[in-house]
Amino acid sequence: MRWQVMAGAMIVSFGCLGFGLDAVAQVSGSGGLSTGTTSSSTIVVETEEIHLAGTGVVSSTTVAAQVIADNQIEQLGVIGRVLLQDAFHGNAGIVNVNQEAGNVNNQANVRVLAFMATEVGSIIGALNLAVSQNLTNNTVVSDGGERSTRIANSFGNAAGIVGVNQTAGNANNQLNVLGMAVGDTLGPDALPINDTTLGQVSSGKRDAPVNNSARADVIENSFSNFRGIAQVNQSSGDLNSVGNVLGVSFQVFNR
């Protein structure tokens, strides 16, 4: 039985000393394998701006959590292949891709962008990231087969923000997070404030391949002349927590 959770969320805020926006995106579920399955991926996204006399504040807050617990998966001679080919050439903007050919995988791409333009004397940019991944009490038993993830001839001459998750395995957490707070000010002062919390837990896991099988993660002829931010996770194995977390807070001065 194939069971997966895939989630993506994006919040973009624009304003001039007076916007507020809150959003919540959640994905969770449960399914039955031979001994039961519980898997969830939760993303909470918030952006807000606070009024202060003579001061502009732009704030970006991201909270993302992935959990895979209490699963038992058995495979015999399974062939799993994930391919992204000849895609997104010359693309401009934001691209989020999730691909999987396994079981009980969590995949998420989260983008939080907050912008503010002001003519006041100072500006404060606050960026907060809290990310956690949890793998507990999972067992994968595999016998033979072949697995591969591949990105070929893609994203050439593209520009912008790209997030890709690929897995041909089982019980993997994959997460790409980007939080960005940008201020545009005519004033003399700017203050970035950043707070990042990252956590990974992996316990009680058992990966028992009976016969060695071919596994490959490949990126070829891709991302040539790419401009921007690219976050890519690939896993052809089992019971992995992989993530790319990037926070950017900066101010542009226009005197």
Image (cartoon, rainbow, N blue to C red):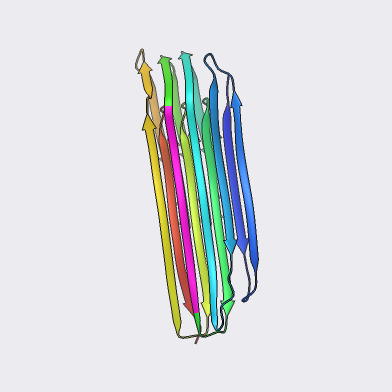
Residue located at (43% from left, 47% from top):
244
Query: Is 129 in the magenta?
Result: yes
Residue located at (43% from left, 67% from top):
193
| Furthest-bottom residue in this view | 255
176 to the left or right of 2: left
For this rendering, which residue is in front, 142 or 95?
A: 142
Query: Is 183 in the magenta?
Result: no
In this rendering, does residue 148 appear at all?
A: yes
Provide residue 119's location: percent of width, then percent of height: 57, 84
In this rendering, does residue 226 appear at all?
A: no
Of helix, strand and loop, which mostly describes the magenta segment? strand
Quarter of the N terminus within the rendering: top right
Provide residue 139's location: percent of width, then percent of height: 42, 20
Q: Is residue 110 above or below residue 184?
A: above
Label tally: 0
Provide residue 199's location: percent of width, then percent of height: 39, 44
Provide residue 6's location: percent of width, then percent of height: 58, 37
Residue located at (50% from left, 42% from top):
65
**Which range of residues does the magenta coloring cover?**
123-136
For this rendering, which residue is in front, 236 or 5?
A: 5
Q: Is residue 148 above or below residue 191?
A: above
Q: Is residue 10 above or below residue 172?
A: below
Residue located at (63% from left, 58% from top):
22
